[in-house]
Amino acid sequence: MLDGHDVIVTAGAADALALAVRARGGPDPVIALEDPAPPWLRAELARLGTVLPLPADGSGARPDLIPRSCDVVVVLPDRGVPYGTRLPLERRRALAGWARDSGGLVLEPAFDGRFAGGPALGDPWSTAMTGSFRDLLPPALRLSFAVLPRRPAGEVERDLSAVRSRRPAVTCQLALTELLVSGFVARRAEQLSLLYGAKRALVRQALGAYPGTRLLGTHSGASAALLLPSAVPAESVVRLLRARRVHVAELAAFHHPGRVPRNGIAFWFGHLDGVTLRRAVHTIARTLDDHRLARRTAA
């Protein structure tokens, strides 16, 4: 339990999101989602309510552009995916002010290598966080969590019954409690942080030296974006990489429909072992070479 929050273990990420949105948004909420954002996150939120884009720039989400009548604002303050942006202090304060003045909820999905102890924005009564243990524990367990403003137990149980298709097994819950109390999860998170740092360095070394490109997001987390010159369509790069069994996404997939995306690709690498990651980035580099992007060399 965190100060002012309850931590609830769920049977999956979708249930955790549903609990967080229901904590303030009701049965048909209007949700502002930072744009760009991971496509799976937009799809899950669209099942819960009406999703509107919240534009973001090089400093993250724009609190001054929050659509009117929003119940929930979903942002990625400590690592905006796919560009790795970090929300500055003045924007964090502006988001907290919006929540205070409107009575809305600021929701922070935690993923992509972030293992924080609680929400980073605002006060406990207007912030929530969701996340998954899949990077820390076997993915087959499908255990996720929601950090919610503290409410009466009856309200929490009612929402749990409304959103869950199945409950986490009691044995799994007890085992997870023991792992948290013993410090295993904290130690595992520290180990992953070191591993991710080495993987990020490998990605920067392999893909950070092509003229006309820009590699973003490799100073934290476990994903990256590569902006491409206009002469190299992202669609062509994605198609050729998939033929070579390397799956990446166009940046267009991260944007709300109708918004103009940047020309580039995004990819996750935290789940790959060292050998597989080396093969993958070598294939990406070879594909860039095939598009006549000659790599810069040291003088």
Image (tube, rainbow, N blue to C red):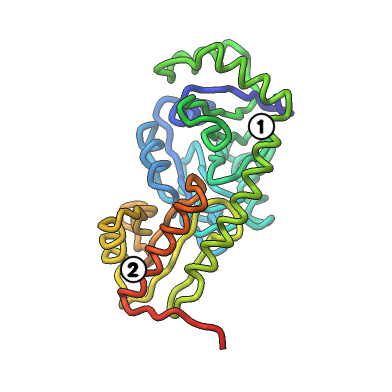
Left or right: 63 with respect to 272? Answer: right
User: How far across and how far down the image is residue 238, in percent?
Assistant: 30, 60
* Quadrant of the rendered image containing residue 165: top left
Q: Residue at x 55, y 17 (%)?
A: 172
> In the figure, 134 relative to 201: above or below?
above
Disc 1 crowd rating (10 Å Cα; few below 14, some 14-19, many 20+) is some
The numbered dot on residue 287 is 2
Q: Residue at x 40, y 68 (%)?
A: 285
Q: Amino acid at mark 2?
A: Thr
User: How far across and how far down the image is residue 202, in percent?
Assistant: 54, 62
Q: Nearer the viewer, residue 294 or 263?
A: 294
> In the figure, 173 relative to 256: above or below?
above
Q: Nearer the viewer, residue 214 or 29?
A: 214
Element class at badge 2 = helix
Q: Amino acid at mark 1?
A: Val
User: N-terminal of the two: label 2 or label 1?
Assistant: 1
Element class at badge 1 = helix
Specify the quadrant that holds the N terminus. Answer: top right
Left or right: 216 with respect to 148? Answer: left
Dot in front, 2 or 1: 2
Alpha carbon of mark 2 to alpha carbon of mark 1: how far? 38 Å
The numbered dot on residue 185 is 1
Q: Residue at x 56, y 89 (%)?
A: 299
